[in-house]
Amino acid sequence: MSAELTPTERLLRACRGEPVDRPPVWLMRQAGRYLPEYRRVREGVSFLEMCRDVERAVEVSLQPLERVGTEAVILFSDIFVPIPAMGIELDFAPGPRLAEPIRTLAQVERLEVPDPRTAVPFVFEILRRLRRELEPRGVPLLGFAGAPFTLAAYLVEGGGSRHWSQLKRMMVREPRVLRELQARLAELVVAHLNAQVEAGAQAVQLFDTWAGVLAERDYREWVLPVHREIVAKLDRDRAPVILYVNDGAHLVDSMLESGADVISLDWRVDLAAAARKAGRRASIQGNLDPCLLAAPPDEIDRRVHELARAGAAARGHVLNLGHGCLPDTPVEGVIAFTRAARSLGSARR
Ligand code: CP3
């Protein structure tokens, strides 16, 4: 490839499986508590207040661009931001906590599916401001949403859980309740992602963090059809869709049936094997273990080269972590990660 690609071109081409000079790089949870400048902006406000505060949200979305050399900006928000507008009371401590878990059909039938543009207008204002800022710099802007299964998991349990036993109990005892809950969430997710693209998001990531707690046969029954429906209702020509599942090594084949442009994998998955399975169907994203960003820079550099070699078997590879940055992730580790990625200069294909 002769002329150098802008970060936007590099990311969008990698997502679509078009030739690039090297894999683009960004990190899940790249804006967060591991950054001292994030903690400063976060001081004195709750997490949800910060998500609604356009100035602060724009500021922290942009922080990793200068500080750690990431090549994409993801909207600062949370998968639970549009949920209170359905009529669900929740708080963060630090993860989502519900006043009342959802367990009955009557509760589900009371849930509204709001128009996100009027329910959470600040999300789209943040995106418009970010896009204006990033467009002249050639840096891509990502939007995101939580997938219905992961949202439902928290809503049914009332918060995070080790075994998700209430959720799984609902799968087998009250399948209709879970199906109806997922259907309403899917409607909201589609509207939310489409509105984000309308407001300037150039790619969108669907986070189904907890779908990996299911056996493949249950994933195929409860999750895959929902992913397929959501992907089919998005305008992928305008903004490619990235699908993330944590702990999903056993689900790669099923994820590839979702129709997503990119499947985002955690560190337990062998990237080269996933790339071979994907073929021309999808690009891959990932997948360094975020805890290994504690390694010395030389080791991070070796790991990035290893990942890039494995990813080269895919039609496209977006370098990322296997899950988000953690509050104790060393900033120097993140910088070493992006620096190593940027040094992968050699032409591919
Ligand atoms: O990636 C980014 O930088 C964009 C912003 C983003 C946040 N959450 C900010 C956040 C994104 C994409 C998310 C997604 C999200 N939120 C997921 C899916 C991805 C994943 O991490 O598995 C889930 C399951 C949630 C729900 C959620 N929000 C939890 C469980 C928690 C607490 C966990 C923790 O890290 O303590 C949050 C809070 C949250 N979301 C923080 C941030 C920066 C920490 C908030 C704080 O400042 O206290």
Image: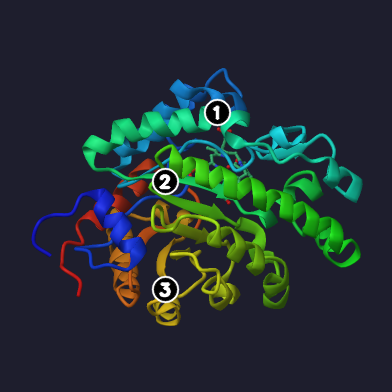
First reached walking from the N terminus: tag 1 or tag 2: 1
How busy is the neighbourhood of tag 1: few (under 14 within 10 Å), some, or many (20 plus)? some
Query: Is residue 183 or residue 302 the one in the foreground?
Result: 183
Residue farthest toward the top in the current orientation of the protein: 44
Query: Is residue 104 or residue 58 the one in the foreground?
Result: 104
Q: As shown in the figure, which amino acid type bears the numbered disc 3?
A: Leu
In percent of the image, x 66 and y 40: which residue is there?
A: 95
- Residue 142 lies, with reference to residue 59, above or below; the image says below
Numbered tag placed on residue 326 in the rendering: none
- Residue 46 lies, with reference to residue 298, above or below; the image says above
Which element is circle 3 on?
helix
Query: Is residue 227 or residue 35 the one in the foreground?
Result: 227
Q: As shown in the figure, which amino acid type bears the numbered disc 2?
A: Leu
Query: Which residue, given by chain and number where applicable, does mark 1 sit on?
Result: 121
Q: As shown in the figure, which amino acid type bears the numbered disc 1?
A: Pro
Q: Quadrant of ligand 1?
A: top right
Asked whether mark 1 lies closer than 8 Å to ligand 1, one says no
Residue 132: x and y in percent read 31, 31
Numbered tag placed on residue 271 in the rendering: 3
Is disc 1 in contact with disc 2, using a CB cutoff of under 8 Å?
no
Query: Is residue 225 or residue 40 the one in the foreground?
Result: 225
Residue 273: x and y in percent read 43, 80
Is disc 3 in contact with disc 2, using a CB cutoff of under 8 Å?
no
Query: Which residue, given by chain and number where applicable, does mark 2 sit on?
Result: 142
Closer mark to the observer between disc 1 and disc 2: 1
